[in-house]
Structure formats: structure tokens, C-alpha cells
Image (spheres, helix red, strand yellow):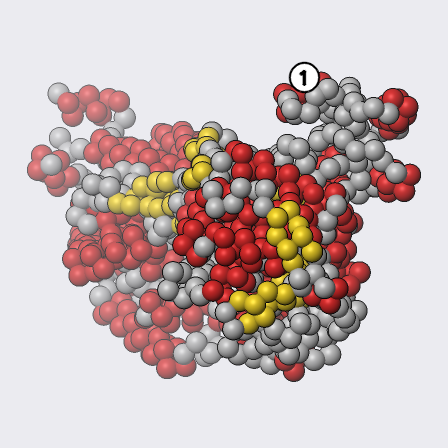
Amino acid sequence: MTQDKRRRIGGYVDYSLIFIIIVLLGFGLIMVYSTSSYEASVSSKLQNDAAFYLKKQMFATLVGLIMMILVSVIPYHFWERFAGWGYIVSIILILLVLTPLGIEANGARRWLNLGISVQPAEIAKLAMILFLASFVCKLGNNIRHRKGFLFVLCAPVPICLLVWLITDNMSSAIIIFAIAFIMLFVASPEYKRFAAIVISVVALGTLLIFVIAKAGAGGGFGFRGARILAWLNPEAYSSGTGFQTLQALYAIGSGGIFGKGLGQSTQKLGFIPEAQNDMIFSIICEELGLFGGICIILLFILMLWRLMIIANNAPDLFGGLLVVGVMGHISVQVLLNVAVVTNTIPNTGISLPFISYGGTSVMFLLIELGLVFSVARSIEFKD
Amino acid sequence: MKNRNKQSENITISNNSFNKKMQEKLVVLFLIVLLAFAGLSVKLISITRDNGEQYKKQVLSQQQYESITIPYKRGDILDAKGNKLATSEKVYNLVLDCKNMNAKEGSVDATMAALKSCFSDFDEGAAREYLAANPTSQYYVTLKQLTYDEIAPFEEMAANTKDNPLISGVWFEEEYKRVYPNNEMACDLIGFTGKDNNGSYGLEQYYNSVLNGVDGREYGYLNDDETLERTTVPAIDGYNIVTTIDGNIQQITEKYLYQYNEDHKNNARDGNGANNVGCIIMDVNNGDILAMAGYPCFDLNDTKNTERLIGSKFVGEDGKVAYDAEIITAENMDELLATDEDVYRNLNNLWKNYCISTTYEPGSVAKPFTVAAGLESGKMSGNELYTCNGQLHVGDHDIKCHNYKTGGDGTLSVGEAIEKSCNVCLMLMGKQIGKTTFLEYQEKFNFGLKTNIDLFGEARTNTLVFNDKNMGETELATSTFGQGFNVTMIQMITAFSSLVNGGKYYEPHVVKKITAADGSVVQNITPRVLKQTVSAQTSSKIIEYCNGVVTNGTGKTARPAGYAIGGKTGTAETIPRDKINYVVSFMGYAPANNPQIAIYVVVDRPNAVFQDDAKYATKIVRDILTEVLPYMNIYMTEPLSDSEREELESLSITIKQANISEEETQTEEETEQIETDENGEIDARGGDVTSSTPLSDEDMQSDNADTAPLTGAVLNEQNGLGVLEDTGNDPR
């Protein structure tokens, strides 16, 4: 009965995924308000409006949800023809940052003023998912060969370099590359090559860190070098580069198992700057404790699990790879964010999907999920 | 969930599909992600478990729950009219919070520029140096004790975050600064208070605990839920003290002490007009000190200024002024005051209150006490006659009278003996009174005992007077005319007040009221009669004799124009007894027939070739009373000579007289009064007076019930404030 009904309405609807998204978004809004209300209320620049960030985020979330629904009812193959265009458009958008349309904030030029401020790097992530899914489909069995493999591996590089060099946003570049890498990993039957790449990257990274650590503060590695030094020993750089990381650690540590209670964080009162952004997870841990933090992680795991199920049941390769791309995007960003907050990796600006403040991010994530729902709708049940 | 899985397995797989291999790899990916999450969760748990407590403390420690002291305001010292003699003003220290300033890009430059534009004294170089050396320091005081007006422009600038978004890391720490609006005025009496709110000398020290309040505190604490709460305990301001000092009388007094010094300095010797000059004016009917002043004096707002020591004798290492001590001059100052110890020893000498802290032999001003003792004890009737041949042989000594060279005063009545200040007569009286009675009355008059005036630093004289054991015939003889025992000025004037007020010995006091910061009265200090020294009859006899001193005797020069006063001069030999060094004085009261106030001026070793002349003191008394008595609305009773009239006019004193015989004079007086009124009244020192409130006749009559009948003319009741504010062009 129920199966029949579903088919009539229009395919499979993953209610648990909807539920998870709504919980994450709702929780995200609560936490954005909790973390930002104090700073906003003391800032005369924002007219002392405690709900300033909340309102903006709510607006972006609503727009995102509408777009998600729209995208979910459009068959995903519709987008396949735009894959190449998306790739080109995202490059153009990134280049547009250099024009007067670009907005500079917090010392970095990363935003575009297109009526609303948009971060091209976020668009590039979506474009990359679309492009690679389509590209891999076109390659077909060629992906098994070295040439095809390298092709796919090199496809994101131009965009990554642009994001890194033009918008000075290394973390987004890494994420874009990681998305591509994960999609390639799933699409390719290989293991060895990936293992080799991972091992060599880790080895290179370790070597680099070792060199930077040896060179010390005056080593000439710029602020990234400083961040690595601060990562290795945050206490030694507590007044400078390590301040944010250390304060985040203090927040997590002081939260205990069940936290200080929602809204009771003291670290958000000026100690963690812009706590509603990248460091929001530390405030979650402070206010809701280890329990709250791990609940959030579990929610993300659930979400990824749902995405995996959808991908594995995707009617075709394109749909499956789209979902894998989205899954890769979310998993990489959550992992890196939590890793930064816990000082597992050097500090780099990565927001926590659905929860951190950031309109473009949440909108594009929801559009990506719209694609996922679109793929899910195409799943046909065996009779 | 299981159901859902089963469904998934049933899904069809098309060509170019998401094949089994991919599904397998996706599961592998998911597992890797899961593993990574597990790793991160372990990391999270380990942070909480291993560093939880430490970080908890860290978080708490970086909260500002350390307490901030809110300073209390030390109470004001007010004169009898409510004018501020000492007050505490809120001042602000400019504190730099380097950590905060460094937090924002461009903040340092913006803040430095703003500070530089608002504070001319701001040392940008030093601040930047400190900032560079201590980037995390949160407390660096750059400028101290700024007034509100000085910091207001910057506060305004910083508050305007629209135009100056980058100003940060600056705050103002509040503090109170003790300020003495009248600088030198009543310096010895008031004393002073440094930054620590600990008074030194005078009222500031005596009433230190009354003036001080309790610091408030702003502090954070952890409540039961271990969250931070902040609480403010407000500071309790100190009490104000209202003194009996009349700012105008005090100022008049100081003006003439200063003038005396100007007239006599560098005369016979280098330096001040006298080693010390002191003056006390007291209300004889309640013990209120109306004025108490000394010279040399110092600026209460600049107590450590050694220039004030110029003209004084150098205080030696034993803490005493040697007879032949060097005079401190601008030239030898650096040499004499070589060490800090030297400086402070001399400053301490300057700071102490001569009127209560220095003891000396009173000389002839003690004679009325001897007579009072004789009359009160019944050993003398007052009708005795004594013969003076210029000297008297007492014990092994021939004690000379001051008129020794002219062969003595001959036969004198008791009154004449006082008028002429005859030592021989007094010695004869002493013999008549006897040692026991004499000592008994010395104690009655409080000689040898403290008066317990409410000022810090009253000298003890218990070892400086004779007792039954060490008083021989000679000591008794010299004591009768005030040599041999030591007193303080406050002892003398307090006892003398009792002699002329009908015998009531009032405890002298400076503070009449203690009020709280909100103005409510905490304590009223009422006059205390400690004892009856003499009877009313004896008192009126003494008044009669002392009036004679001014009308016929040695004190003629003390009489101010238009008034009849009484008193006694004193010319005391002092150590070394070389017949060169003298302490001259005049102790009097006014008006003569109904004493209201007592005045005592002591000139310690006047700067003159022949020091033994009481005129140095009587001149000061006359000058002071000439202004003070009209100011106090005491009516003139004596006819004025032309020169006296001129003198009063030059002082802009309105002449108002009791209704005496000369009708003409009086009409003139009245016309004059009206004119002055119309022209706008001028204060005693010629400065502008903002307003004046003439007293009604009723007031006058109740004030001076005994001096009836009175004319309607009234002296301008000086607006105390107007006069006090006049210190800008210091009359001294």
C-alpha cells in the first residue's frame, strides 16, 4: 500500500533525511543566535540588534529550502547539459572577485556582490560535483585507465588553484579537491593509486610540517607557517595565531560532559571571535557538552548514511555520483571543521555545514540536497 | 531501518549504472569517514577528560571576576559657612589595555592619534615603546589624575564608533584627589592628605577615620551552577566635617600675619619677621575656634615645596632649632637640605601647628591668671596696694622688674599692677597666694594638661610646669609673671576665655558637626563646659583690670578703631636668657564690656634689634580686630578719630556704631552706610563681593542683647563664598 502511494506521488522520498536536515537547520539557527546574540547586541554597527545574524541566516535558510524543493522536483538529468557551463561559470565568478564587484571582508576578498553577497567558492563546489559526475559518465570505462584517472584527478585543479590564489581561500580549494578525489575514489575501481596518493600527501605534509617546525616563527612561511606552529603548540602562541584555537579548546574542555547549558557559554563573550562562524562547534561543546557535540556528529553520520543509501540505489551513474559528490562535500567539511576545532589539524577557515553562520554555504548545501532528493525520487522499486 | 535496507537491495540497476564496485567503494568511503569521526570523537572526549578541569579553570580565570575597587570619596572639610576648606575631586587615570588595542588591525594607530589629539601631555613614543614590549599587558597607566573636563573630548571621540571605529584599548580608572581650594589657608589647622587617604597633621589626621569611607568593590563570583555573576558593592563615602572656622576671619588673620612678616622680614637679621607667629581667635562663650593661623605657612596643594622653608631657621639633626641656627635661603638651601632626611625634618617643622604644638614661656600674659587665683582663693581681696622698687629679692636672686632702670613703679593697686605689668607686684601677690594655692589654680587653668582640642599634634606640657616638689620660692615668684613654666597657645587662650566669660572653661574645639555624604547630620558636637575656673565676680574683676591694660596700660596699641577691648600684653624672655631673645604676645578679648571673642597673638622672637616690645603683637591684634569685629557685626562703641575713620574707609569697612552721644557722627554714619549699599558692597579686602544679606535688626538685637540700644545700621554680612573664592589674588 504505502509503496504504491509513494510511486504515485513521484518516487522515493527519504523522510529520515528530511528530518535530519530540519533538525540540523533548526539546531544551527539556535546555535547561531546563541553564539552571535551577545556580540551583535554590543555592536553599534549592527544597531545592537541581538538577532541580526539570526535573521540573515533564517532568510538564507528559507531561500535555500525553497530552492531545495524546486531542485528536487526537477529531474536531475536536466542539469547534466549545464555541467561544462557550470565549470566555466564558476571560473568566471571567481575571476569576478577581482573586479569592483568583489567584496572584501575580514582582510580577504572572497565575496561577490550580486544583489546579495555570494561566495564563488561555494558555487564552485556545486559546479565541481555536477561537472565531475557528468565527466565521469562520459569517460565511461576509460576511468579504469591511467589516462582517464589522471584526467579526472586534474579536472578540479584549475578551479582549486583559482580559489586558492585569487580568493586566498586554501580551505575551499582543499575541499573542492577533496570532493573530486572522493568522487574519483568511488567511481574508480582502484585502491592502490588512492592509497599511494594519500600516503604520499601525508608524507609530504609531515615533511613540510617538520621543516616549518624546525624553521620556527621566523621561517618565512607566512601566516600558514604560523598557523602550523600554533597548531603544534597552541599555548606558545596563545596571544596571536593560537588564540582562537586555544580558546576553542578551552570552550570544549570547560563544557564537560553535559555542558554549561544552552546560552551559558562564556567563551562566546568576546574570547572566541565570531563564534557563530567556524568555531561554532566549540561553543556547542561548551554549552551542550561532549554529549551535544557527539550528538551533532551522530546526526551528520546519519545524514551521510542516508546519502550513501541513496547513492547506492541511484538509478544511474550520474545520479549516484552526484550524491557521492554531495556526501563527499558534507563529510569533508564536517570532518575538517571538527578537526580544526579540536586542534587535530592546523587552523583553517572551514564552516560547519548547516550550522555555521553563512548564507551562501547553507543555500548551496540545500541546493545540493535538492539534487539528492531529485536522485532519490528517481529510485524505482522492484516489484 | 531494516525494512528500508531491504527495499534498497531490491532496486534495479541499469546500464551505465552505479555498479556493485562503486557501491562497495562507497561503503568503504563511508567506513573511512566513520573512522575519522570516531577518531575525532575520541579526541573530543580526551580533551574533555584530560584537560577539562584545567580548561575550565582557564576559562574562569580569563573572566573578569577579579574584583575592581571602587574608591570612596573622602569627606570634605567645611568652614562654618559651608565653604570647602578641603575636598576630594574625582580624577581619572588614563590606562592602556595593550592586548585589546593590538587585537584589531589599525587600532593602535587610530588610538594613538586620538590620544595625541586629546591629551597634550600624552607621550606617544613611550606608549608605543611599552606597547611593543608588552603586547599583552592590560594595565598601563600613561597619564594620571586627569580631570573630567580633560578626558571628556576623548570619551566623546571613542563613543562615536561610526567615525572612529578603531579606537580601543583605552579606559579611565577613577580615583579621588584631595584638593584644597584655598591653598595656604588654614594649612596648619587643616593638615593634608596624600594619595593613600591618610591624613597628616591637623583635622585631616585627627578626623582621619571619620573622613574616610569604605571602598566599594565590583567583583565576579561563581554561583551554584558555576556560572559567572558580577556584583557591585558601592563605596561608602566618608563623612564631611563642618568646622567652627570662619573662612573670612581666618583669611583676615592670615592676611595680617603675612603682612607682619612682610614688614619685618630681613630687618635685624635675615629671614622671616619672626621665628614663628601664631594667632588664635576663639568664641569665649562656647570654645569654638574661629580662626587659627601661623606663619610661616605652606601650600596644602603643594606640601613638599621647599621654597616655603626659605626664611625659616634650619632644623638641626636633633630635630630642634638651635639658637644660632642658620637661616634657610634660596642660596644655601641645596647645601643645607642635602638629604631627604634634612628636607623632611624641616618640612615637618613647617607643617606642625605652632598654635598647639609649640610650648614656650608665656610671660606677662600669665599675670591675669595669678590675680584671678588670688581673688578666687580669697588670698587677695583686690583692694591691696603693692609697692615696686624695681626689683625684689627672692631666695638667692634679685629679680628685676622691667622698670628697674627708672626705679620702679611705686605703689600700685591690683588693677594698676596689671596695667603696668609690674613683675614685683605680681611676685608680692604670689607670696600672698602661696605655693599650694598657686599650683592648685595652675591646674584649674589647665596649665600642664592638654586641652584636648580636636586637632592632631597638641603638645604635652605636664613636665613643663612646676609641681609641689620642684617649685621653690624663686619658681613661684617667676611663675607669677609667666616665666619658668611652659604653655601652648591653645592652653592660654582657652583658660583666658574662661577668665572673661564668667568662669566657664570650655573644651576648645574646631569641628561642630559631622555630616554624611548625603548631607544628613551624623553628629552635632556641642560645646562642653569642663569646669568652672573662677566665679563670675572674679571674672568681672579680671575684665575690669584687663580693660585698663588697653585704656591706660601697656596694651593701648592693641585697640582697634571704634572698639573698646581688653587684654594683656606679654614680653617673655626666652632661651637663651640673654635679654635679647623674647617671645612677645597679646592676649585679649572684645568687646570690652561683654567679651564675645578672645584673640591671642604670639610673636616668637620678632625680627628686630630690640625684641622686647609687645607692640609687635598688639599691632597684629589691632589690625585683625579692626576687620574682624565689624565683620562679626559687633557694634562700635568708641568715637572715631579722623585718622581712624580714614583707616576704616581705606579698608572699605562700613562703620556702624552703637547709639552713643554724638548725634552728628551717627547720622553721617548712616548716610555712609546707604551709599555703600547702593554702590554695591565691597568686601574687606577690596575684592568684589557677589552678594550680601544684611541682618535684620531683630537678629542684631538677639545677637547682642547686652549692647542696647543699637542703630539700624548694619555691616554687610559678607558672603563667605565670595571672599573665599577671592584667593586667586591672594591677599597675602
Rendering coords of residue B222 (x, y %): 26, 45
Residue B352 lies in quadrant: bottom right
Viewer can see residue B29 = no
Residue B720 lies in quadrant: top right
Where does label 1 land, which residue? B698
Rendering coords of residue B430 (x, y %): 51, 55
Give the left or right position of residue A36, taking residue B666 as reference: left
Q: Residue at x 53, y 61 (%)?
A: B477
Q: Residue at x 34, y 79 (%)?
A: A210
Label 1 lies in what chain?
Answer: B
Give the left or right position of residue B723, taking residue B386 as reference: right
Give the left or right position of residue B689, taking residue A265 as reference: right
Q: Residue at x 38, y 58 (%)?
A: A244
- The residue nearer to you, when weighing B186 against B393, is B393
> Does residue A363 lie above or below B99 as drawn?
above
Rendering coords of residue B565 (x, y %): 70, 40
Rendering coords of residue B656 (x, y %): 80, 28
Viewer can see residue B609 = yes
Q: Residue at x 69, y 43 (%)?
A: B548
